C-alpha cells in the first residue's frame, strides 16, 4: 500500500504558501509506514519544531490500473473519507531552499492520518462534498471538493501515468487554505458533510 499525495490543488492554499499555480498536478508519495494506526495519537517528531495540519479528501483505490483514461477513473475507487497530511513545515522550507526533495518533511513515519471510510455511493453528489477541520473545537480549515483545481477523476488518471495504482492504495487530493501548527495536547477532528470521520490527539 502507498499514499499518492497531491500538492497545490486549491488556489487559496497556493496563495497562503506564497507559491504559484502549477501547470499539472504536483504528486509525491508517502510509504505505508506513514500511516497512523487506528486509535494512536499523532506524535510530533523530534526533527521538527513546526508541524502543520493539512486536512484533505481521501479516496481508496479499489482496482488495479495503469494509464487510466479520465472517463473511467470513477471505476477505480469505491470509498472516500478525510484525513491529515502532517507536514514538517520548517524542514520542508529548508529543503525547498536548497532545491532538495522534501519527502523527509512529508513522508515521515506517522505523518498520514486516515479517517473512517464511507462508501462513495452514500453521497448524492461527489462533486459538492464539504469538509472541515476543528482544532480544539475551533474551525480552522473548511472547503468544498468543487474548489479543487484538479478533480478526483483527473488526479487518478494523471497519477496512473506514472505509478501503477494497486488495490488498497490511498489518494490524498490536496489541502485547502487555513493550514497551521499543532502542539502537544491539541485535539484535531475532521468532518465530511458534517459527519465526524476522525478525532486524534497530538502528543
Image: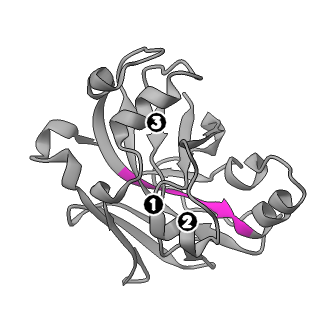
Mark 3 or 2: the one toward you: 2
The picture quadrant where one finds residue 164 is top right
* Placement of 26 over or under 180, stated as above or below: above
> Which region shows up in magenta?
82-89
Q: Residue at x 42, y 27 (%)?
A: 157
Quadrant showing the N terminus: top right
Q: Residue at x 67, y 70 (%)?
A: 51
In the image, taking residue 133 as reference, residue 71 lies left or right, namely left
Dot 3: element: strand
Q: Residue at x 56, y 57 (%)?
A: 21
Q: Answer with mark 3 or mark 1, whichever residue precedes in sequence.
A: 1
Tell me residue 56's x, y (percent).
Answer: 43, 56
For disc 1, the neighbor class at 10 Å (few under 14, some 14 to 19, many from 20) is many
The circle drawn on residue 143 is none
Tell me residue 66's x, y (percent).
Answer: 48, 14
The picture quadrant where one finds residue 145 is bottom left
Q: In this figure, which residue is indicated by the disc labeled 2?
A: 14
* Residue in the foreground of this view, choosing between 101 and 106: 101
For disc 2, the neighbor class at 10 Å (few under 14, some 14 to 19, many from 20) is some
Q: Contact, CB < 8 Å: mark 1 with mark 2?
A: yes
For disc 3, the neighbor class at 10 Å (few under 14, some 14 to 19, many from 20) is many
Distance from label 1 to label 2 (Cα)?
A: 6 Å
Q: In this figure, which residue is indicated by the disc labeled 3?
A: 170
Q: In this figure, which residue is indicated by the disc labeled 1?
A: 10
Distance from label 3 to label 1 (Cα)?
A: 19 Å
Residue 39 in sight: yes
Tell me residue 179's x, y (percent).
Answer: 53, 72
Q: How is the image coloured?
A: one colour
The picture quadrant where one finds residue 153 is top left
In the image, taking residue 101 as reference, residue 32 lies left or right, namely left
Amino acid at each position: 500500500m502507498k499514499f499518492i499525495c497531491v500538492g497545490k490543488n486549491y488556489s487559496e492554499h497556493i496563495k497562503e504558501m506564497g507559491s504559484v499555480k502549477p501547470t499539472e498536478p504536483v504528486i509525491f508519495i508517502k510509504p505505508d509506514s506513514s500511516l497512523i494506526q487506528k486509535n494512536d495519537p499523532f506524535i510530533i517528531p523530534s526533527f521538527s519544531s513546526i508541524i502543520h495540519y493539512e486536512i484533505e479528501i481521501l479516496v481508496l483505490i479499489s482496482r488495479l490500473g495503469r494509464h487510466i483514461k479520465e472517463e473511467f477513473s470513477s471505476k477505480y475507487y469505491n470509498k472516500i473519507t478525510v484525513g491529515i497530511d502532517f507536514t514538517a513545515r520548517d524542514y520542508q522550507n529548508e529543503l525547498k531552499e536548497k532545491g532538495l526533495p522534501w519527502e523527509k518533511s512529508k513522508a515521515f513515519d506517522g505523518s498520514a492520518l486516515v479517517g473512517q471510510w464511507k462508501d462513495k455511493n452514500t453521497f448524492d453528489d461527489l462533486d459538492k462534498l464539504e469538509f472541515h477541520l476543528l482544532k480544539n473545537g475551533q474551525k480552522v480549515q473548511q472547503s468544498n471538493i468543487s474548489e479543487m483545481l484538479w478533480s478526483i477523476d483527473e488526479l487518478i488518471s494523471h497519477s496512473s501515468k506514472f505509478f501503477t495504482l494497486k488495490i488498497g492504495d490511498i489518494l490524498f487530493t490536496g489541502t485547502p487554505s487555513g493550514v497551521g501548527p499543532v502542539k502537544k495536547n491539541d485535539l484535531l477532528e475532521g468532518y465530511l458533510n458534517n459527519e465526524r470521520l476522525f478525532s486524534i490527539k497530538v502528543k
